[in-house]
Amino acid sequence: MSKTTQTNLITSTQNQLNNVQVMGILNVTPDSFSDGGQFTHFNSALKQVDNMINNGVDIIDIGGESTRPGAVDVSVQDEIVRVIPLLKAIKSRFDINVSIDTSKAEVIGEAITYGADMINDVRALQNKGCLEVVAQSDIAICLMHMQGMPRTMQENPEYNDIIDDILEFFRQRIDCCERSGINKERLVLDPGFGFGKTVAHNYEVLAKFAQFKTLGLPVLAGISRKSMIGNLLNRDVNERLAGSLAAAIVAVQQGANIIRVHDVQESVDALNILKAIAQYKI
Ligand code: 9MG
């Protein structure tokens, strides 16, 4: 390898690492799987935002609908009441990017009106009206892969080749977005750890994460506290920090641009270790 190629490699690794964004999870649902109910109260949610900002978060992801396996549906009105006042309060008090985790066109519309910076849609804008409302704005979108729907998705997930199947899904969703007038540059892709995937599927996706970079878009990894960690290590949900950090770092080393996490301070620390060694890697 020539010296120039080596230097380019190091610079691009450092650039990618320096630009990795930490997305902090703020679930405002009574039944979210790992922090269920903790931040349903407005003031404790704002306090949590303040903590995350002090710990170096880049994006706050507010979710008003639980997507854990078996979760019950929530009405449009309930979801709006849960997330929009919080979005407004965060935007008026803090200088921070906010993502709204939703699959409902009406919630997306309200989120856009009140200054959200990103829509995080686990259904990849496949619900009625979503493409249209997004096309009328310039908001960023995270398109996540899921096989099936949250209520039943873990029953018997099957793939021909999980990486090829997810890549094909991404190509189709990117194409739909572009045909609806949503510029490709606004999109982030996410293979959807735990969404219609067995533990083995999830680890294959993590092992081959770099392949999602071939589509030329930023990629998000959401692994924090998930059952792929708990099942492998036999850990309860509040004992999954070490496993979550290890998995997030593996994703970042393969090019993840955003990591979606519960534990912001620990994730920023782990990323800083990676950044410190990146300059010596040849
Ligand atoms: C809402 N939500 C829960 N898990 C997620 C993940 O892995 N990625 C994204 N984008 N959203 C998620």
Image (spheres, grey):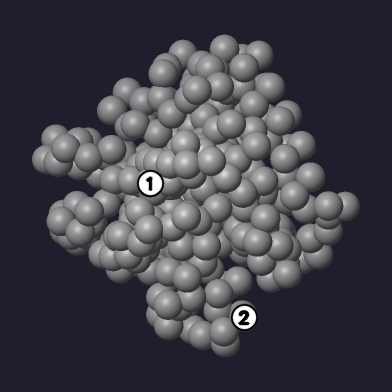
From the image, tell me which residue sits under label 2: 232
Label 2 sits on what residue type?
Leu
Q: Is residue 59 visible?
A: yes
Question: Residue 200, image x and y in percent?
Answer: 73, 69
Q: Secondary structure at mark 2?
A: helix
Q: Which-is-in-front pick, marks 2 and 1?
A: 1
**Residue shown at the point (55%, 33%) measured from the top left:** 217
The N terminus lies in quadrant: top right
Q: Nearer the viewer, residue 193 or 101?
A: 193
From the image, tell me which residue sits under label 1: 14
Q: Is residue 82 visible?
A: no
Label 1 sits on what residue type?
Gln
Please identify the residue farthest to the front as the structure is shown. 2
**Residue shown at the point (53%, 17%) measured from the top left:** 183
83 to the left or right of 218: left
Q: Residues within 10 Å of mark 2 (few under 14, many from 20)?
A: few
Q: Earlier in the sequence, mark 2 or mark 1?
A: 1
Question: Residue 216, image x and y in percent?
Answer: 59, 31
Do callouts 2 and 1 mark residues in contact (Cβ within 8 Å)? Answer: no
Q: Nearer the viewer, residue 74 or 88?
A: 88
148 to the left or right of 28: right
